[in-house]
Each structure stands twice: as C-alpha cells, then as structure tokens.
Image (cartoon, grey):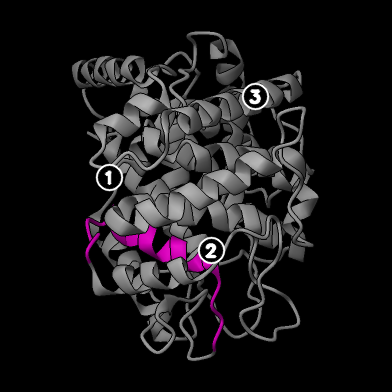
Amino acid sequence: MHLKSGLFRVLQGFLFLCVCIAGMKTNATFAQQSSTAILTPAEWGQVDDSVERGLVWLASKQQRNGSFPTLPQGQPGVTSLCVMAFIAQGHIPGEGPYGAQLLKAIEYIASCQKQNGLLSLIAPRGETISRNVGYEISNAAPYNHALSGLTLSEAYAMGQVSQIENIDATIKKAIEATLAMQRWPKRVPAEKGGWRYLSVQGDFNADLSVSGWQLMFLRSSKNAGFDVPEKPINEAVEFVRKCYRPKFGAFLLRVTDQDERSRGMAGAGILALAHAGLHDAPEAIQAGEWILQQSFRDYNQIERFTQTRYPRDRYHYSAFLCTQAMYQLGGKYWQQFYPPMVRVLLKNQTPDGSWPKENHAYDGKFGKTYSTALAVMSLGAPNQLLPIFQR
C-alpha cells in the first residue's frame, strides 16, 4: 500500500497532538530541558513575544482564498512557508486560534497543483512537465513545488487534513513529479541525484538549494507513510556530499572548484546530511566551523564571499537554514550561533510584528510575508514541532 493504514494515521495524529500540546510551553521550558540554557529566562520571554507578534502579523495578511500575499510566481511556496511558521509553534490545522486559517491555506496550496503534479500557481500544464518555459517560471516553480509538498506532507502526518479532498492523491502526484525531475538528464555525472530549474540554464543541471528542499519533501512524505524509494533519496544525499569542497570548508551551490561559498548553502548542506542521520559527518562539522566564522550581525546585508556579479547570499533564507543546521549539529555550534542570531532578529523586528523584506534583489520581490515566515521559524528552531526539523 502507498499510504499507512487508517489506524496508524490515527495513532500518529494523536501522538503529534500530544507533542503539540506539550509544545505550547514557553521557549524557556524548552531551554531548561536542553543540556545548556543558552538564553536567560527574560530573553526566552522576548523570543516568545516576538514570535507571537510575527504570527499575529502574518495571520492579519492572509487573503480570502487562503494564500498569504506575495508575487504570483512565489505561490504557493510563500504561503507554505507561512503555514510551516505556524505549525512550528504548535498551531494545528483545524484547531485553536489559527486552525481555520491554516486549513484554508493548505486547501489553497493543494489547489495549485497542475495535471503533471507540479505544486505551483504559475507552471507548465499538461500531463508531463514542459521544460520550455521562461526564466521566472523555470526558477520559481521547483521551489514552490518542494516547499508546498513539504508543507502538505508535514500537515498530513498530523492526521488533521484528511478532510481536504484528495489530499493523499495530491501528495502522491507531487512525489512522482519530484522523482521525474530528478531523473532529467545531467551534463555532468557528479550532478546525478540533484535537482535544479525547469529549463536548462548555464552549464550545470543540479544545485544544492533546490535539491535540499526536494530532498526534505521526499523524506517528509516517506515519514508520513508514502511510498518513496530509497534509491532517489540516497542519490540525492550523495549529490549533497559532492557539493562540499574541503579547500573551502563549506558546501557550495553546485559541484565546482570555484569559490562560491554562501552562508545559506553551508546551512543547507548540513541540514540535508542531518536528515540522512549524518550529523557528525566531517563535511557537516567543517561547514559548521565555517558558519561560526561568519556573521549575521549586519542585519539584512548581503555578504560577498567572492567577487561575483550576482551575490549568492540571502539574509533571511541563510539565517533560517543556518539556524536549523546549527541546531542539528548541537553543542558549541548551537550555543555560539543561536544567541547572537536571536538578538539581531529581535532588534530588527518592526513595530507591527513583521520583518523587512529581503535585501537581495531577487528574494526581496516576494515581500515581507516571506522574510517574516523565515524569521519566525529561525527564532522557533528550538521548538522542533515540525517533524522534518527534529534532531
């Protein structure tokens, strides 16, 4: 069977509900349960307040169709990030103060699926995924798809979205689309197992940014009981490991010997290996050391690690990936990284509860819902109520 039995789903939903009820405790409680209290009780209280104000702002921006506002080419990816921001704080679709809003958002996400399985508002139609598309569609659709698939499978695992029509079929079709895109021809053998954009651009056909999200989706859906073969996951992990370059001590966007370091890709590589159970892999440890040498203190500033025409680093995106990655590494990596990150995010939250839009030319177009959702999930990393981010 492709899906878990009804009894198992009920039991898993009950267990998740118990975790979420426990998750309603303050972040101070989470810190006290950890090996080291890295923030003072007063600081944990500030984190709680900041997160709640961020969620209130996000909830106030939800539109009638269930989506959260952004550019059309960013849907339903940005809406998916917003939903995960709520779930990560213990809010359950269909229950509690945001329950109805979350269900409506999840229905919107599912409604964006195309016949070919892509979960993207703007994407090629038809039974198969066309690669003959323009730049904006080509670049955004794989992110929309992976983020949306991840959100649906995480919500499905709770057992709280079964009333959404054909939700299991939607996820299954999305899995098939992800696996189909992974099988697209690669010019370089080392890129096997990875993903990139819809159309062929440049001289490489797989990158760590897109691949990290697609891998998260596959792992999440497998955890939720869907039939996902091990081989594609293993090949994706191998691709991730090839993106690490010892001479730079970090993961790069692609398999290359050029210096293309960025904080975001260092975090993405660590996180991908952690999902494979490789928390102590040498690549992850060295990338963690490299992240500790970088700084997020200059809020919303793009770091140029190399003299590139188009900077590769995004502040909020990198902050989110590095926070989750350093939590997975634990120990000194978490203790040294999280407190400064918290203080910067608290200082730069605006009075209305949001965070400023991304300063990067491309990501900034997706607006404050994008940056706010990422900031909330960065602050809430210790909660670990989203199964995919649990250590």
Q: Nearer the viewer, residue 289 or 274?
A: 289
The circle on residue 391 is 1
Q: Amino acid at mark 1?
A: Arg
Residue displayed at 44% across by 66% down = 292
Q: Amino acid at mark 3?
A: Arg
Residue displayed at 76% across by 82% down = 309
Residue underneath mark 3:
53
Q: Helix, strand or loop at disc 1?
A: loop
Q: Helix, strand or loop at disc 3?
A: helix
Mark 1–mark 3 distance (CA, rounded to whole Å): 27 Å
Q: Is residue 29 visible?
A: yes
224 w.r.t. 300: above or below: above
Q: Helix, strand or loop at disc 2?
A: helix
Q: Earlier in the sequence, mark 3 or mark 2?
A: 3
Which is closer to the viewer, label 3 or label 2? 3
Q: Is residue 264 magenta?
A: yes
Q: Nearer the viewer, residue 332 or 378?
A: 332
Q: Is residue 371 left or right of residue 252?
A: right
Mark 3–mark 2 distance (CA, rounded to whole Å): 26 Å
Quadrant position of the N terminus in the picture:
top left
Residue underneath mark 2:
264
Q: In the rendering, at what x and y percent does residue 109 appear?
A: 60, 32
Q: Is residue 118 visible?
A: no
